[in-house]
Amino acid sequence: MWIIQSNFLDTNQITPLVEALNEFDLPFKDVSVIPFSDEFATPLELDHQRVIPYGSTKLCKIAEQRGWTGLFYDRSTFNVGCWNQERHDMLNSDPNIMTIREATSSFGDVDYPDDEEWFIRPYEDLKAFNGTVTNAKEIRNWVDSVESGNFTFDDDTLVAISVPKKILKEWRYFIVDRKIVTGSSYRTKGLRLTSREEDLDVLAEAQELADGWLPHETCVMDVALTEYGVKVIEFNCLNASGFYYHDIRAFAKEVNSHFERKY
């Protein structure tokens, strides 16, 4: 059984997945998540926990609370510290880990010019916000906004801050049972350009990365081509990762087959 979130998500993401589930005659229900709540707009009645959720990070947190077995996530491994400890090919291998409160103090220092750029992201996956490259002034303004209560997380939230790296091209790969199922490039030289990855050499190189340590046998891996070779940008929970120009039919089929075999 799949549970598909139908609100607060781009229909271009959800519609192809629903079409694939219908094509393969895979059962699913759609749900609407109530904002700032752990409940659904219409109560969901299930007599089992054998559920694959797909939607927002909020849906995944609900799935974690309810013990749904198709949530491919481990809180102890989906974090920046664990990735850098287990792998030596992470793009941002030198982050400063601190709370948002500590960032307030650090970036209030005059040693950080307003226009100095930094990459900031949450320490954990199921992100409180999306990672971004920004400057010290904007980080200070953003931190002040967090402290004012304008976000759903607080100033004890851990973040990872590092020097931005030059990236030539970026890909997203969906990995199921340690095998790459589908991949798409999504940015080239800073421009949003999507293309399904079908080059066998590129896919083989990505599979070599997937053969290494993973936070979960089924996950999403973002990869960057840099001046120093191919690096892993980050890992994401598959249940809450967006598609670019991916083969969503292959995604649905392989995830469901893996789930039926192992869960």
Image (cartoon, rainbow, N blue to C red):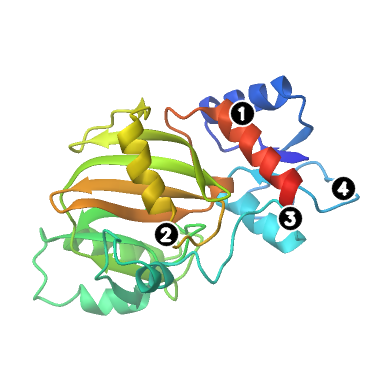
- Tell which tag, 1 or 2, sits nearer the viewer: 2
Marker disc for residue 212: 2
Picture mark count? 4
Which three-letter amino acid code belongs to the residue tagged 1?
Answer: Leu
Q: Depth-wise, is mark 4 or mark 3 nearer the camera?
A: 3
Residue placed under numbered mark 3 in the picture: 69
Q: Does residue 172 lie above or below 137 as drawn?
A: above
Q: Which residue is the site of mark 1?
A: 17
> What is the x, y in percent for residue 189?
17, 37
Q: Which mark is residue 65?
A: none
Instruction: Locate residue 97: give its quadrant.
Output: bottom left
How far from the left and from the top, in percent, is residue 80? 39, 67
In the rendered structure, which disc, 4 or 3, sits on the residue that comes first in sequence? 4
* Tag 4 secondary structure: loop
Q: Could you give the CA–CA distance between mark 4 and mark 2, rounded to whole angstroms? A: 37 Å
Q: Position of residue 27 (x, y in %)?
A: 79, 32
Closest to the camera, between mark 4 and mark 2, is 2
Choose the circle earlier in sequence order: 3 or 1.
Answer: 1
Considering depth in this image, is 82 or 259 the residue closer to the camera? 259
Residue under numbered circle 4: 46
Q: Is residue 260 left or right of residue 105?
A: right
